[in-house]
């Protein structure tokens, strides 16, 4: 039997004992696996993955800063086209519907507490994938695009499974925004786009900008998905306010807006919305 291939891995887990245990078990099952980083929050996971370019990333779903799904989405947006995208393994305590989404897209997952037999299966699967990658030609732009499209299906399937579309009663019609002692009531119909800004979200209309203290991931489920499209992990735009979309050679899409002079960028993760281009 051939020796398992060498590989480099990153572990993102906010519980130190679980992270140490996973690293030790991985080394026992796969002596040729190098753990290049072990981090405890999502922002560090993203930064280290982009810097170190690991072959495999073990991402805890629930982490401070960015969760595992947000890290995966950010990697899709920022990963250089000249590098192979890492194999992703999500470490999760999610319900069965989320696990089905992983399985359908052939992305591996581990459920806490990780059973030794299940970890061994995951390791063997990763080893087979690494062997396949070694035998395949270097990844080009088209291959990366296909991989990113597949990952988009994973993330979209999980998000769809977690939360049903909001009912009419749950949707936001008016947003209260505060500036000093004044509270402005902004109709959602007037919003051109929303943009994440640290602990706030910028609410941009044709006339002015407002700030609300609500994370974008909490705002998104309360908007009508037929009207408001997420085009970047930090941007949601009202579809009728998109005047023109232009795709460049890297696959990014640039959006010209009605009523606003700035141009928005739709990342590769959401470029499928404009696949007719």
Image (tube, helix red, strand yellow):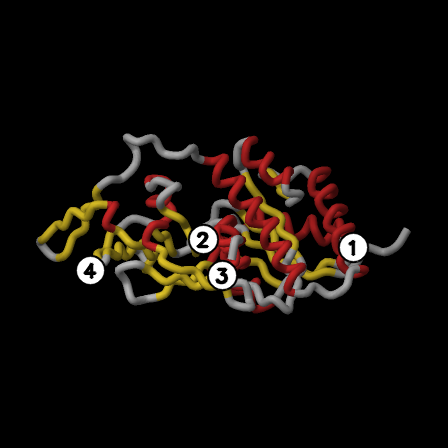
Q: Secondary structure at mark 4?
A: loop
Q: Residue at x 52, y 52 (%)?
A: 272
Q: Nearer the viewer, residue 243 or 119?
A: 243
Label 3 crowd bin: few (<14), some (14–19), many (20+), radius 10 Å? some
Q: Secondary structure at mark 1?
A: helix
Residue 192 visible in the snapshot: yes
Residues at marks 1 and 3, CA–CA distance in whole angstroms: 29 Å
> Which mark is on residue 30?
none
Foreground mark, 2 or 3?
2
* Disc nearer the start of the sequence (2/3): 3
Foreground mark, 1 or 3?
1
Residue 52 horizontal/vertical position (percent) = 60, 67
| Horizontal side, residue 122 vs residue 3: left or right | left
Q: Residue at x 65, y 58 (%)?
A: 9
Considering every residue shown, the one lying at the far right of the view is: 1
Q: Residue at x 64, y 64 (%)?
A: 141
> Which mark is on residue 208?
4
Q: According to the image, label 2 marks what residue?
A: 66
Q: According to the image, label 3 marks what residue?
A: 44
Residues at marks 2 and 4, CA–CA distance in whole angstroms: 29 Å
| Horizontal side, residue 150 vs residue 207: left or right | right
* Disc nearer the start of the sequence (1/3): 3
On the image, which quarter does residue 107 sit in? top right
Residue 1 horizontal/vertical position (percent) = 90, 51
Q: Nearer the viewer, residue 193 or 80?
A: 193
């Amino acid at each position: 039997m051939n020796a398992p291939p060498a590989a480099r891995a990153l572990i993102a887990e906010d519980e130190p004992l679980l992270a140490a245990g996973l690293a030790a078990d991985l080394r026992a099952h796969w002596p040729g696996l190098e753990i290049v980083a072990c981090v405890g929050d999502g922002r560090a996971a993203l930064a280290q993955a982009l810097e170190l370019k690991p072959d495999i990333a073990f991402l805890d779903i629930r982490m401070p800063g960015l969760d595992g799904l947000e890290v995966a989405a950010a990697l899709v947006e920022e990963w250089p086209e000249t590098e192979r995208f890492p194999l992703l393994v999500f470490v999760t305590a999610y319900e069965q519907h989320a696990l089905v989404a992983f399985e359908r897209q052939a992305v591996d997952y581990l459920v806490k507490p990780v059973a030794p037999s299940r970890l061994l299966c995951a390791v063997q699967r990763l080893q087979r994938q690494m062997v396949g990658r070694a035998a395949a030609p270097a990844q080009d732009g088209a291959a990366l695009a296909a991989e990113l499209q597949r990952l988009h299906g994973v993330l979209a399937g999980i998000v769809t499974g977690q939360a049903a579309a909001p009912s009419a009663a749950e949707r936001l019609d008016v947003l209260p925004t505060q500036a000093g002692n004044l509270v402005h009531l902004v109709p959602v119909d007037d919003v051109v786009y929303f943009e994440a800004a640290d602990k706030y979200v910028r609410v941009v209309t044709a006339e002015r900008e407002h700030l609300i203290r609500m994370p974008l991931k909490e705002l998104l489920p309360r908007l009508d998905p037929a009207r408001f499209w997420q085009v970047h992990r930090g941007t949601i735009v009202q579809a009728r306010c998109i005047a023109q979309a232009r795709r460049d050679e890297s696959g990014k899409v640039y959006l010209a807006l009605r009523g606003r002079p700035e141009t928005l960028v739709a990342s590769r993760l959401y470029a499928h919305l404009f696949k007719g281009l």
